[in-house]
Image (tube, grey):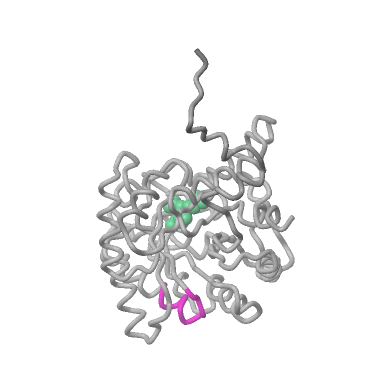
Amino acid sequence: MIVHPYSRPRRLRKSEAIRSLVQENQISACDFIVPLFFMDGENCKEEISSMPGYFRFTLDLLLQEVKECYELGLRSVLLFAKVPDELKDNTGTESLNPDGLMQRAIKAIKEFHPEMYVMTDVALDPYSSNGHDGIVEDGEIINDISVEILGEMALSHAQAGADMVAPSDMMDGRIGFIREVLEENEFPNVGIMAYSVKYASCFYGPFRDALDSAPGFGDKKTYQMDPANAEEGLRECALDIQEGADIIMVKPGMPYLDMVRMVSDKFEVPVAAYQVSGEYSMMHAAAEKGWLNLEEAMLESIIGFKRAGASLIASYFAKDIAKLLKK
Ligand code: PBG
């Protein structure tokens, strides 16, 4: 006998029109945070060897890039400075320089494109001679003195005009300390996006090429999370929210979409997800070999973030996707 089901989910997939009517999630340009890399110099952009199509800009060209992003409908950037080796030391002294590269970049963007929302990476690793996110003593990453520097770094970004600071270091207690420093110095409206659930991941490899920030010894497992853990991530989020985080983040993205879902179900603050460098690079590599269609792969990966519950997505595909959406 032939089965005639009353329920036929395929009715709602019959045509483009009905599919679009019942579509549960959409991507729009204003969901994105655009990570930007920059360096000293003039009129120069360098392609990052392990991130095809992604560049480090000198500040003049960075401004141009910010303008293009804004015109494409993108509304926030996340800044990462490439610091020359000779300016690196164990305590990240250069990170507090009011005329440092990061501080100049923030000022320039806020001067020429004040409408763009500027977020900044707060972490020691790009400034550390050890390539670690904290101060090193006898081979250990020391928490509390690192947090003090992170507080000062966040303050110096706020003074330069940052809208939101994004501590990516995973030191304990840094969100509360940064919040306190910002309040005490009359920056109550500078936000904090906490990298709350940040894993010790191999997918950061290409990023470390981009900033030349790979750890000089050991790994980051004493501060970044074990990929095997989920509950621990919820504890991290609860702490960061209690300490004053405005937005919490899960990072990397695609291997951790379960965490995006758990965190967005459980907490009432916006959740960001970071599609990291390795996720970008592996899709590019497969596309170069002709194994994946890059456009389809990027869109499918991003809708996955939305479906999992991310309200903001940091992605190196942001500009490409904004261009596709414009078409
Ligand atoms: C460092 C930092 C990292 C990333 C953002 N901030 C790397 C790391 O923790 O080693 C990775 C981003 C990416 O891979 O795209 N504080």
Residue at 61% from the left image edge and 75% from the top image edge:
109
Q: Is residue 260 visible?
A: yes
Spot occupied by residue 188 in the image (x, y as percentages of width and height): 38, 82
Image-quadrant location for residue 271: bottom left
Q: Is residue 233 magenta?
A: no
Spot occupied by residue 173 in the image (x, y as percentages of width and height): 27, 65
* Residue stretch in magenta: 154-163
Residue furthest out toward the top:
1
Residue at 53% from the left image edge and 50% from the top image edge:
207
Closest to the observer, 154 or 254: 254
Q: Is residue 208 visible?
A: no
Residue at 30% from the left image edge and 55% from the top image edge:
266
Spot occupied by residue 128 in the image (x, y as percentages of width and height): 43, 60
243 above or below 256? below
300 above or below 311? above
Does the magenta stretch mainly form a helix, a strand or a loop? helix
Q: Is residue 91 left or right of residue 291?
A: left
Closest to the observer, 14 or 79: 14
Residue furthest out toward the bottom:
186
Closest to the observer, 38 or 257: 257
